[in-house]
Image (spheres, rainbow, N blue to C red):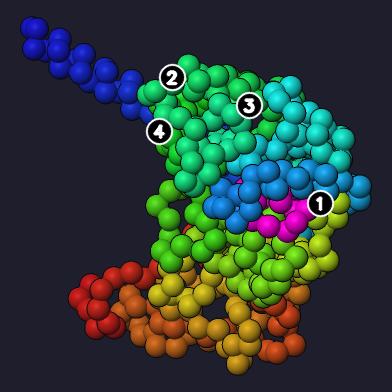
Amino acid sequence: MIKTFLTMLTVLVTVTTNAQTNDSILVQEQKMQWFKDAKLGIFIHWGLYAVDGIDESWSFFNGYISHEDYLKQIQGFTAKKYDPNQWVDLIKESGAKYAVITAKHHDGFALWNTKYGNLNAVKSAASKKDVLTPFVEKLRDNELKVGIYYSLPDWSYLDYTHFTRDSIRYKISDEPKRWDTFLKYYHGQLKELSEQYNPDLYWFDGDWEHSAEEWQAQKVREMLLEKNSNTILNSRLKGHGDYATPEQGMPITRPKNKYWELCMTMNDSWGYQKTDQNYKTVDQIIGVFSDVISNGGNLLLDIGPKADGSIPEEQASLLKGLGRWVHKHHEAIYETVSGIPKEHFYGPSTLSKDKQILYLFVKGNPNGEVVLRGLKNNINRIWVVGQGAKLEHQVVGKVYWSQYPGIKYIKVPDHVLDENMTVLALLLDGEVDLYREDGAVIESN
Ligand code: GLC
């Protein structure tokens, strides 16, 4: 009797736990949906470092310049040409659906009117104004999602542990009260951000300097979600985030995390650096972007405005170049899911959500034809995305006595090619079905 009761109880508990897990997976999926569909975001690193054009925060941390001299840049942070309308127009033109701006980097300089300290754009910089609020407003006016980058470490704050690479102010175990002071400060700033801007996304950074317990990561997560249960947190909160953030290099294999975002600079710097002219080309950025979405991720492409608030010409023109391509090919980008394995098509691909349209991203000139292997579906129609032409295809190597579907050759004439990357849409006769069986043509059915 007791045994039966216990078994029933176990079953009940398992069912409820599973239901709860399914429930929270569903809730998580709903919350992450806009992010999953957005594909492209713009990262903005704007701060004191733009004045002299040096590494954001790291330049003093690593000892290339003294902290004192680093802070002198505050006199040059004028924001006098800052036009949030123009920023948002450019972001829209790029095709991005969200932006993430450095509200505060590791150097502690805040772009908003924080009541915590004086190191900010309003109280101590030449700008003498809050430069975050108008930007957030413009994003919202244009239905773009708002992302706030916030550095957990604050190397300028006197009660923070770390100062430079080789000088630490104190150890938490020696001065726990001092650490509490810092916790109040940083939690307080986050509260301000959440109350004033109610961000759609928080982009934390610098969690490596302390443990989850020390940061009180769980508490921070709860605090932010309490204000807005739909807000998304990136992974850099010591395991308390919603999505992974590989940096700079497109992962070679598909990331395991269901939600991920590659952050990448346009040249080799996050902030504006006059000496860094190593810009990627539009082709290269599109190449990385298509690889990212083909693998189910987002690209967070960085710009670094100048200290006066203007966006460097090179960066604006890359955003425009990317935007031309993204807008033309929007149907193959937004709201799609990751594509098919490379063995079937040697290039990036995406699929419509119902998996009945396969989009193939074709780099350069395929010399007349694109090859698709092991697709079991019949193709009802092929068209060139954003251009409209209907294309022919031929099936080669298909024999009636085998399941092997053969190779499909799609004829692509030169005149339909895009100047950066051509995208083909294939309307299939049902959900995509790939031949993944072992062996060659001869097999036993
Ligand atoms: C790194 C750096 C930081 C930069 C960030 C962007 O974590 O610390 O300077 O802002 O990457 O991803």
Q: Quadrant of the N terminus?
A: top left
x and y, in percent, of residue 62 in the image: 54, 52
Q: How busy is the neighbourhood of tag 1: few (under 14 within 10 Å), some, or many (20 plus)? A: many
Amino acid type at circle 1 is Ala
Image position of 286 (left or right of 371):
right
From where the camera sits, is residue 22 visible? no
Tell me the crowding category of disc 2: few under 14, some 14 to 19, or many 20 or more residues within 10 angstroms, Cα based: few
Residue 211: mark = 4
Report crowding for label 4: few under 14, some 14 to 19, many 20 or more residues within 10 A (C-alpha): few
Which of the image's four quarters has the C terminus? Answer: bottom left
Identity, as a three-letter code, of the amino acid under mark 3? Leu
Mark 4 or 2: the one toward you: 2
The residue labelled by disc 3 is: 190
Give whichever of discs 4 and 2 has the lower sequence position: 2
Give the left or right position of residue 379, taking residue 330 as reference. left
| Residue at image mark 1 | 307
> According to the image, label 2 marks what residue?
176
Quarter of the image for residue 275 reads: bottom right
